[in-house]
Image (cartoon, rainbow, N blue to C red):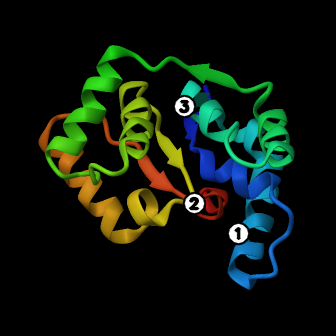
Amino acid sequence: MKPLVYVETSVISYLTARTSGHLVTAARQAWTSEWWEIAPSHWDLRISALVIREAARGDSQAAQRRLAALASMAIIEITEESQILARRLIEIGAVPASEPEDALHIAVASVSNAEFLVTWNFAHLAGPGAKMKLQNHLREIGAHIPLLTTPEELMES
């Protein structure tokens, strides 16, 4: 059985965006494309309805590209348990109150026992400080802790 990976929306955005002129962003886009090609043979990739909602926002042509990339992906249900956990993560300060969608991504990955949550969101998910804070809070409340990672890091495994 392949490890379960919850794919957060930023990964799909990097995958489908026009190549950036910013060196770091362009590199992340390239890593994402490379990871996307090999990922299905190594991991069980899943998204939630939240990813679909977020991918549908913004420029209609870009949204169509994002939604097309998601079309065949399996969907993890957003349960009442994940919604409760998301609210709890905000209440305890694990995620800023201004970022309820980030809290819900973490909660869905946690409740579904995903081994990894793959993202390019460094501010609230994959940055070293955010990662440590989230892991500590999830441990304190006894929730499953998915490894918060980027496509680049996951390719190395």
Please report the residue visible at 51 percent of the width from the left and 56 percent of the height from the top. 149
What is the CA distance from the residue labelled 1 to the residue labelled 3?
22 Å
Q: In terms of image quadrants, where is residue 71?
A: top right
Instruction: Give, as a three-letter code, the residue at label 3.
Output: Leu
> Badge 3 local density, few (<14 within 10 Å), some, or many (20+)?
many
Please report the residue visible at 50 percent of the width from the left and 17 percent of the height from the top. 77
Q: Tell which of 16 and 72 is nearer to you.
A: 16
Instruction: Give, as a three-letter code, the residue at label 2.
Output: Trp
Residue 59 sits above or below residue 71 on the image: below
In the image: residue 39, left or right of residue 129: right
Residue 41 on image: x %, y %: 77, 37
Q: Which residue is mark 2?
A: 120
SS at mark 2 in the image: loop
| Mark 3 vs 2, N-terminal side | 3
The reply to whether discs 2 and 1 touch (Cβ–Cβ < 8 Å) is yes
Instruction: Give, as a three-letter code, the residue at label 1.
Output: Arg
| Mark 1 vs 3, N-terminal side | 1
Q: Which residue is mark 3?
A: 50
Q: Can I make out residue 142 in this image?
A: yes
- Give me the disc on residue 69: none
> Badge 2 local density, few (<14 within 10 Å), some, or many (20+)?
many
Q: Tell which of 129 and 2 is nearer to you.
A: 129
Residue 69 sits above or below residue 71 on the image: below
Q: Which residue is mark 1?
A: 28
In the image: residue 131, left or right of residue 116: left
Q: Can I make out residue 45 in this image?
A: no
In the image: residue 151, left or right of residue 124: right
Q: In terms of image quadrants, where is residue 139?
A: top left
* Quadrant showing the N terminus: top right
